[in-house]
Amino acid sequence: MTAALKYPVLMVHGMGFRDRKRLCYWGRIPQILRENGADIYFGCQDSNGSVESNARQLEASLNKVLEQTGAEKVNIIAHSKGGLEARYLISTMGYGEKVASLTTLSTPHNGSLTVDKLLRFPAPAVKLGCRAVDLWFGILGDKCPDTYSAVNTFRTDSAEKFNAENPDDPRVYYQSYGFVMNKAISDMTMFIPWLVVNSVEGENDGLLAPRAVQWTNFRGVYRGISKRGVSHCDEVDMRRHRLPISSGDVSENDITGLYLTIINDLKNMGF
């Protein structure tokens, strides 16, 4: 069992999902981390809000955690778009003094070349589709759904601008992780997206290529030890089954083991 972390952990979900007690976005991970000494909380931001809007919701969640625990800071573990929201909270909103570390998994820090191509479709058609999605996520509970803004965040020129405006805060420890599927049929829910991204950028996790997710202290690209690989859904244990993974000489007997390694490393760094 891992010794307790100094600071609580705020887990920040990605796009298209919400934090719910049942059907948890993070699968078995929160419970396993709690069993190993981590105090776990959730970002509770909208599914499809803009980065700016969701960061304000994260602000409320982070402040609530600090008030409840009496801690001075939190460790943030963020998946996909949630990593951008956490960076915006830290840099633009000035929360560096309240965040000890930010770990991002498959976050599009550098934007997506695939999204660049897809957004060449006529803007009115794209906006119409995004409005339809907003209506659906509003029904599901989003306070400020803005799918069009969220999708545009993934453009490479948007990422370049975002990175310039949200540099790393020297008070925060940053690290990032990437993942890839072996082939389209590795995860049938990612079948079509994988094919699209593969045709533009090569290997990917069903949504993002390794070049898109590399950021400070990049820990490498993880692959499945089996033929399956690791999909964007697998990264947060949505299927809740054992998935051995590896990156170079580093291997874990399950995706949950990667998260245990993350919190153990943070503990050893005094976080």
Image (cartoon, rainbow, N blue to C red):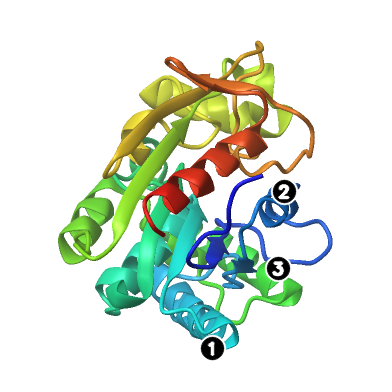
- The residue at 54%/66% (across/down) is 10
Q: Disc 1 or disc 3, which is closer to the eye?
A: 1
Q: Residues within 10 Å of mark 3 (few under 14, many from 20)?
A: few
**Residue flagged by tag 2: what amino acid is it?**
Ile
Which disc is residue 136 wearing? 3
Q: Is residue 164 above or below residue 62?
A: above
Residue 234 visible here: no
Secondary structure beneath disc 3?
helix
Left or right of 42 on screen, residue 268: left
Left or right of 112 on screen, residue 167: left
**Residue flagged by tag 1: what amino acid is it?**
Glu
Residue 30 visible here: yes
Q: Give the CA distance from mark 1 to mark 2.
A: 24 Å
Q: Is residue 138 above or below residue 236?
A: below
Q: Give the CA distance from mark 1 to mark 3.
A: 33 Å
**Residue flagged by tag 3: what amino acid is it?**
Trp
Q: Nearer the viewer, residue 72 or 224?
A: 72
* Residue beneath disc 2: 32
- The residue at 45%/62% (across/down) is 75
Q: Give the CA distance from mark 3 to mark 2.
A: 32 Å
Which disc is residue 67 wearing? 1
Secondary structure beneath disc 1?
helix
Q: Label 3 near label 1: C-beta < 8 Å?
A: no
Left or right of 238 on screen, residue 130: left
Q: Nearer the viewer, residue 122 or 5?
A: 5
Q: Residues within 10 Å of mark 1 (few under 14, many from 20)?
A: few
Secondary structure beneath disc 2?
helix
**For marks 3 and 2 on the same chain, the one whose residue lies earlier in the sequence:** 2
* Image position, residue 219 (x, y; %): 37, 33
Q: Disc 3 or disc 2, which is closer to the eye?
A: 2
**For marks 1 and 3 on the same chain, the one whose residue lies earlier in the sequence:** 1
- The quadrant in which the C terminus is found is bottom left
